[in-house]
Image (tube, rainbow, N blue to C red):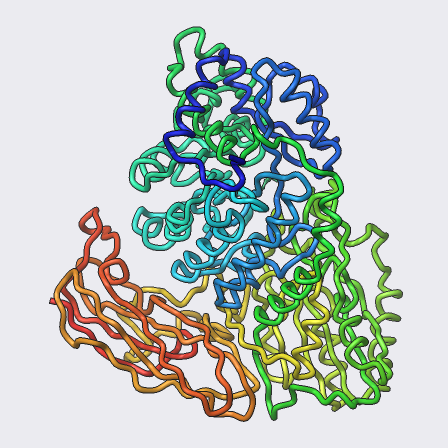
C-alpha cells in the first residue's frame, strides 16, 4: 500500500531504519548529518559533487522544484547509499500565499486560524518540493527591541504553547508524513528571546525556573504535538552555547520530554562554537556538538570535515553517530521519501491558484488585527466617502505588507493598504502620498542576500527630497475628507539582525502624523509593523488606531474590510506595548514587589514617566461591546492534585456581531516561591451576535496550578490560596478565589 495513505507503524519504521543503517559506511552515515547550503552565496564545492559522494542528507536555501529533482536524482541514483535528500527552507508564514507574520497570527488568539494558515503554507511548500520547514519559532519574547519578536507568539507561555501546538498540527497534519504536509521544526531551543538588551545573538542568562516556567512551555507543547525536528539556538545560554548544550538537548529534550526526532543546528552554528569562544577548533566543535545531542550540522561543514576522524581515532563513540543517523532516517522513512523522492514540477502552480488559499489569508489577517483606539466611534468609516487621503511610507509597500521572513526568492505580491482601500471605494477619489522615506540607520547584513525580499535598493532621500515629500503628504491630506495614515516599519526593520534600541515610529513619521492631525480632519492611524511601537502621542491624539501588523498577501483587503466595517476587529495584543524602548523588557506576568501599586509607599519605578504599558497584554477593542459576568468556580476549596472548572458568561451588549477573547488569569498568594502577579491560564475566542450570550469554561488542575520551584529545585503544586480573574485583557477585574489544601 502507498505509504502516503497509511501511517507507518513505529516497528516498521524502526526495522527499515536498521536495515538501511546496517548497509551504510561511516562516510555515508556522516553524510546524513550534513545539511548543505544550496544557495549560490555559499562558497565551496558544487552541491552535486558533495551529494554524489553521499556527503549530504539535506539541502537548505534552495527554492526551485526542478533543481530539487535534479539533486534528488543524484542522491537516489548515484550516491553510495542512495538515500533521498530532505529539502528544507524557512516557510515561516506562508509559501506563496503569505499569511500575517507569526506575532500577528498570535494576536488572533485563535489556534484554529493558525493551524489552517500553516496547513496551507505546508501544502504550497510541499507542492514546490520542500519537505521540511524551519518553523514554528517558539521563543518567548518580552523585549520588543529584539527584532525576532515578529517571528514568535509574543510574551506569554500559555498563548505561546497554544500557538506552538496549532502550528505543528498545521504544518505536519495528523501524523508525520501526512500527504500535502511538511515536517516542522521547533526553534530556537532555547531562550533566544531573552538576549541581553534585546540585541540579536547576544548571550542569555535565564535561571532554570524562568526556563521551565516561561521559555520551555511552547517547546514542550510542540513535542507533545509530535514535532519532528528541533533547531538549537545560536547564543550562549548561561555560558553554554545552545548548540553544545547537553543539558538542553539530551537531559531536557530527550530525557525528560521523550523527543524522538532529530535536532539541527542553526546556520553555521557548529562552526561558530569556535568563534563563540567555546570550542578550541572545528574538531572540538564537532565533537562537543554531536556529543551534546546535535544531530545535523546546518551549513557549517564541520561535521563533514571532522566526524570521521573523531570516530576513527576513538574519540567519538560510533553509537552516537548511529543514533543521530537513525533519527534522521526515521523522518525520511515517515515522510515517504523512499517511495516518492521527486515532485511533479507542474503541481505548485495548481496548488497556489486554489482560491481558498487567498480567502484563508484574508480571514487570518482580519482576525489578527487589533483595534487599539476608537474614540467617538470614528471606525468603521462609511463607504460613501468622496475623498480619502492615504498617507505614509508603508501604505503602498508590498514588502512591508508581507513582512519579515518571506520565502527565499519570493517576490512580494501583497495587496497593499492603498490598493485595498481603492478596491473598497471604487467611486471615491483616493489620493496617496508616502511622505518621507524610512530606512534603517545601519543596513542589515541580510539585505545583500536575496533572502530578505526587502525594499528595492535605492539611494537615500536627500533632506530636501524628504522635505518635499513631507509637504506633498500634508497637502494631499488637506484636500481629503478623511485621512488614513499608514505608518510603521519596513520589512527589514524587524526579524533576524533587526533589533533596535528605540520603539518610536522610525524617521519623520510622527512629525508627519502631527502635521496631518493639525488639519483638524478625521484621522485614522493604521500601523504596519513587526513589533510593539511606542505610540504615546498617537494614543492620546489620534482617535482611531488599528494595529494591522504585517498582514500578508491579502493584508490590504483585510485592512479595508476592517476600516469600512465588513469585518469587526477581535484580535488582542500578544505583547504589551511599552511607552518607551528603554522600558523593555516589559511584561504583565511580573512578580509582586515590596512596593506594589496599592502600597502607600508605591514607588513608580521611574521618575521620568509611567512604567506601565501603553496598551496591556491581551488588550483589543471591537466595534461592539461585551459584558463578562457570572464568574464561578466549581469548588471554592480543593486538594492538591484536583481540577476545578471556571466558568463565565460573555454577552455581546452592542449592535453588531463581534468576537471577544475571554481570558483567565491566576495569582498564587504565597507558596514555595514568589509567583507572578498574574499568569494567563486559559483563553477562548468566541463569536457573538448582538444580544447573544455564551458560557466559556476553563480548567485549572495540577499543570495550571503547579510550577518549577527554584527554592525546592523541582516541580511543585503548593497548598495555597489563589486569586482568579476572568476578563477581556490582562487587567481583568472580575475576581474569584480558590483555596488549594
Ligand atoms: C538563521 C535563523 O536564525 C534561523 O531561524 C533560520 O531557520 C536559519 N538561519 C535558516 O535559514
Q: Quadrant of residue 527?
A: bottom right
Indicate the position of residue 508 as horizontal and vertical percent values.
74, 69
Residue at (72%, 89%) from the top-left corner? 382
Instruction: Look at the image and tell me in which quarter the C terminus lies.
Output: bottom left
Relative image position of residue 673 (x, y in whole percent): 21, 58
Q: Position of residue 220 (x, y in %)?
A: 37, 48
Q: Is residue 379 left or right of residue 112?
A: right
Q: Is residue 69 above or below residue 487?
A: above
Locate residue 458 relative to residue 24 in the image: left or right: right
Q: Is residue 165 above or below residue 547?
A: above
Q: Position of residue 31 (x, y in %)?
A: 55, 20
Q: Quadrant of residue 607?
A: bottom left
- Can residue 736 be seen here? yes
Q: Tell me what residue is drawn at x 83 percent, y 55 percent.
A: 460
Front residue of 410/23: it is 23
Q: Between residues 508 and 489, which one lies in front from this camera angle?
A: 489
> Ligand 1 sits in which quadrant?
top right
Q: Is residue 588 left or right of residue 438?
A: left
Tell me, yes or no, if residue 448 can be seen here. no
Q: Vertical placement of 707 versus 519: above or below?
A: above
Q: Residue furthest front?
A: 1
- Residue positioned 36% across, 67% down in the render: 680
Q: How many marks?
A: 0
Residue sitting at x 63%, y 14%: 53
Residue furthest toward the top? 313
Q: Is residue 461 above or below residue 448?
A: below
Amino acid at each position: 500500500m502507498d505509504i502516503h495513505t497509511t501511517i507507518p507503524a513505529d516497528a516498521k519504521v524502526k526495522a527499515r531504519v536498521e536495515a538501511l543503517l546496517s548497509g551504510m559506511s561511516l562516510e555515508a552515515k556522516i553524510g546524513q548529518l550534513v545539511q548543505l547550503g544550496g544557495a549560490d552565496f555559499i562558497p565551496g564545492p558544487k552541491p552535486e559533487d558533495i551529494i554524489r559522494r553521499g556527503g549530504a542528507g539535506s539541502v537548505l536555501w534552495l527554492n526551485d522544484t526542478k533543481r530539487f529533482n535534479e539533486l534528488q536524482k543524484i542522491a537516489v541514483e548515484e550516491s553510495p547509499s542512495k538515500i533521498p535528500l530532505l529539502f528544507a527552507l524557512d516557510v515561516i508564514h506562508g509559501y506563496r500565499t503569505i499569511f500575517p507574520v507569526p506575532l500577528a497570527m498570535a494576536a488572533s488568539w485563535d489556534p484554529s486560524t493558525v493551524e489552517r494558515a500553516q496547513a496551507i503554507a505546508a501544502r504550497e511548500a510541499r507542492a514546490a518540493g520542500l519537505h521540511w520547514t524551519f518553523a514554528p519559532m517558539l521563543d518567548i519574547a518580552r523585549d520588543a527591541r529584539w527584532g525576532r519578536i515578529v517571528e514568535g507568539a509574543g510574551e506569554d507561555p500559555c498563548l505561546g504553547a497554544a500557538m506552538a501546538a496549532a502550528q505543528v498540527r498545521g504544518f505536519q497534519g495528523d501524523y508525520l508524513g501526512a500527504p500535502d504536509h511538511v515536517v516542522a521544526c521547533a526553534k530556537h531551543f532555547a531562550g533566544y528571546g531573552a538576549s541581553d538588551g534585546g540585541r540579536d545573538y547576544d548571550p542569555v542568562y535565564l535561571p532554570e525556573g524562568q526556563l521551565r516556567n516561561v521559555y520551555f512551555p511552547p517547546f514542550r507543547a510542540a513535542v507533545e504535538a509530535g514535532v519532528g525536528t528541533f533547531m538549537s539556538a545560536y547564543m550562549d545560554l548561561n555560558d553554554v552555547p545552545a548548540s553544545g548544550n547537553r543539558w538542553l538537548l539530551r537531559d531536557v529534550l530527550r530525557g525528560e520530554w521523550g523527543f524522538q526526532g532529530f535536532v539541527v543546528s542553526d546556520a553555521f552554528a557548529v562552526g561558530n562554537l569556535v568563534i563563540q569562544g567555546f570550542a578550541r577548533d572545528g574538531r572540538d566543535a564537532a565533537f562537543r556538538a554531536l556529543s551534546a545531542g546535535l544531530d545535523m550540522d546546518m551549513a557549517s561543514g564541520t561535521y563533514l570535515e571532522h566526524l570521521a576522524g573523531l570516530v576513527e581515532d576513538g574519540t567519538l563513540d560510533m553509537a552516537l553517530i548511529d543514533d543521530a543517523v537513525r533519527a534522521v532516517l526515521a523522518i525520511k522513512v515517515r515522510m515517504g521519501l523512499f517511495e516518492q523522492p521527486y515532485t511533479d514540477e507542474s503541481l505548485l502552480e495548481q496548488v497556489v491558484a486554489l482560491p481558498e488559499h487567498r480567502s484563508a489569508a484574508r480571514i487570518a489577517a482580519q482576525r489578527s488585527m487589533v483595534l487599539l483606539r476608537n474614540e467617538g466611534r470614528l471606525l468603521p468609516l462609511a463607504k460613501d466617502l468622496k475623498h480619502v487621503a492615504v498617507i505614509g511610507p508603508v501604505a503602498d509597500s508590498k514588502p512591508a505588507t508581507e513582512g519579515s521572513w518571506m520565502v527565499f526568492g519570493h517576490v512580494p505580491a501583497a495587496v497593499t493598504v492603498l490598493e485595498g482601500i481603492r478596491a473598497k471605494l471604487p467611486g471615491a477619489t483616493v489620493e496617496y502620498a508616502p511622505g518621507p522615506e524610512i530606512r534603517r540607520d545601519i543596513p542589515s547584513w541580510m539585505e545583500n542576500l536575496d533572502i530578505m525580499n526587502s525594499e528595492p535598493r535605492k539611494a537615500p532621500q536627500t533632506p530636501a527630497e524628504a522635505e518635499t515629500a513631507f509637504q506633498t503628504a500634508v497637502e494631499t491630506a488637506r484636500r481629503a475628507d478623511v485621512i488614513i495614515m499608514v505608518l510603521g516599519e519596513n520589512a527589514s526593520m524587524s526579524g533576524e539582525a533587526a533589533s533596535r534600541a528605540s520603539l518610536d515610529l522610525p524617521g519623520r513619521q510622527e512629525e508627519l502624523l502631527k502635521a496631518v492631525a493639525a488639519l483638524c480632519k478625521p484621522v485614522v492611524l493604521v500601523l504596519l509593523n513587526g513589533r510593539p511601537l511606542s505610540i504615546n502621542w498617537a494614543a492620546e491624539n489620534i482617535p482611531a488606531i488599528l494595529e494591522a501588523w504585517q498582514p500578508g498577501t491579502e493584508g490590504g483587503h483585510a485592512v479595508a474590510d476592517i476600516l469600512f466595517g465588513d469585518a469587526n476587529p477581535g484580535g488582542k495584543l500578544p505583547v504589551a506595548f511599552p511607552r518607551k524602548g528603554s522600558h523593555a523588557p516589559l511584561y504583565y506576568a511580573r512578580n509582586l514587589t515590596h512596593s506594589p501599586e496599592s502600597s502607600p509607599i508605591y514607588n513608580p519605578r521611574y521618575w521620568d514617566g509611567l512604567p506601565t504599558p501603553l496598551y496591556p497584554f491581551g488588550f483589543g477593542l471591537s466595534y461592539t461591546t461585551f459584558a463578562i459576568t457570572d464568574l464561578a468556580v466549581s469548588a471554592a476549596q480543593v486538594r492538591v492534585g484536583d481540577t476545578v472548572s471556571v466558568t463565565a458568561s460573555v454577552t455581546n451588549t452592542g449592535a453588531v456581531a463581534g468576537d471577544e477573547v475571554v481570558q483567565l488569569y491566576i495569582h498564587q498568594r504565597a507558596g514555595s516561591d514568589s509567583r507572578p502577579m498574574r499568569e494567563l491560564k486559559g483563553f477562548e475566542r468566541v463569536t457573538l451576535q448582538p444580544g447573544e450570550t455564551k458560557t466559556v469554561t476553563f480548567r485549572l488542575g495540577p499543570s495550571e496550578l503547579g510550577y518549577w520551584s527554584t527554592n525546592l529545585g523541582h516541580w511543585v503544586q503548593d497548598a495555597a490560596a489563589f486569586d482568579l480573574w476572568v476578563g477581556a485583557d490582562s487587567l481583568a477585574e472580575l475576581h474569584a478565589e480558590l483555596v488549594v489544601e
